[in-house]
Amino acid sequence: MKLVVGLGNPGKDYASTRHNTGFLAVDAFAKREGALFKARREFHGEIAEVVFAEKKILLLKPDTFMNRSGEAVRAAVTFWHLLPADVLVIYDDADLPFGSVRSRAEGSAGGHNGMASVIETLGTSAIPRIRMGIGRPPHEDMPLEDWVLGRWSKEEEAGLTDMLAQTLQTLENVLKETP
C-alpha cells in the first residue's frame, strides 16, 4: 500500500493558489482513476482510494493547513502501519521554474513548510516526493508568501494542464517502480 499526499491549504480561498498544486495533482489522479475524496476527521483531511499498478493507493489531502501537514500524514501512517518510504508527497516548489516537475526519494524540505512538517513529524527526510515548479515572484520586492498564496496568472493557467500531465506521468512512474 502507498500513501500519496497532495499538500495544500483547505477552503475555497486557497483553491486556485500556487500553494495548492499538490491538491490539484491528487485531484487529477483521483478523477482519472474514478475515485472520490471523502472527509475523514481521524486523518485530518480527505481520503480517496484507488488501485493502480496492482497496488492499493491512498490519496490524502490534509485539511490541517500547510504548516501542519505532518499531523495528517502521521495519522494515516500510524493507522495503516506504513513506513516513510511508503509515503509520496506532492507539493509546489518556488525554486523550480514554472511547469517543471522533479521527483526524488529523499532530501531536505528546501524551505517548504508543509514538507518540513511532514519530515519533522515522521522523523526522517527519507520521504519520496514530487515537486511541481511554480517559479519565483516576478518582482524581488514581492514576499514569497504572497507569491505562493497568490492566484495563477493567465499565462500560468495555460501551462497548468501540461504541468499536471507531467506530474501524473511522474507519479505513475514512481508508483510502478516502487514495491
Image (cartoon, rainbow, N blue to C red):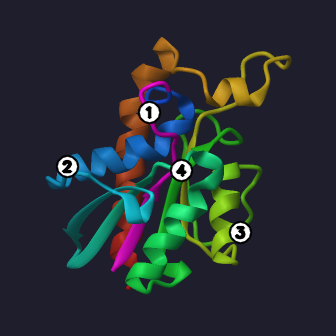
Residue under label 2: 32
Q: Would residue 121 be counted in the magenta stretch?
A: no
Do the residues under discs 3 and 4 have CB atoms within 8 angstroms?
A: no
Q: Nearer the viewer, residue 58 or 103?
A: 58
- Give the residue furthest to the right: 141
Rate crowding at label 1 as few (under 14), some (14 to 19) or many (20 or more) other CA atoms within 10 Å: few
- CA distance separating discs 1 and 2: 22 Å
Q: Amino acid at mark 2?
A: Arg
The residues bearing labels 3 and 2 have C-alpha atoms spaced at a distance of 32 Å
Instruction: Tell me which segment is drawn in magenta.
Output: 1-13
Q: CA distance from mark 2 to mark 4?
A: 25 Å
- Read off the residue under disc 3: 120
Numbered circles on residues, count: 4
User: Is label 2 or label 4 in front?
Assistant: 4
Query: What whole-number distance in Å separates the C-alpha atoms at marks 1 and 3?
Result: 25 Å
The label number, if any, that marks residue 64 in the structure image: 4
Q: Amino acid at mark 4?
A: Thr
Most common SS among magenta residues: loop
Q: Which residue is mark 1?
A: 11
Please tell me how crowded label 4 is: few (under 14), some (14-19), or many (20+) other residues with Cα within 10 Å.
Answer: some
In the rendered view, tell whether residue 22 sits above or below residue 53.
above
Decide: marks 3, 2 in contact (CB < 8 A)?
no
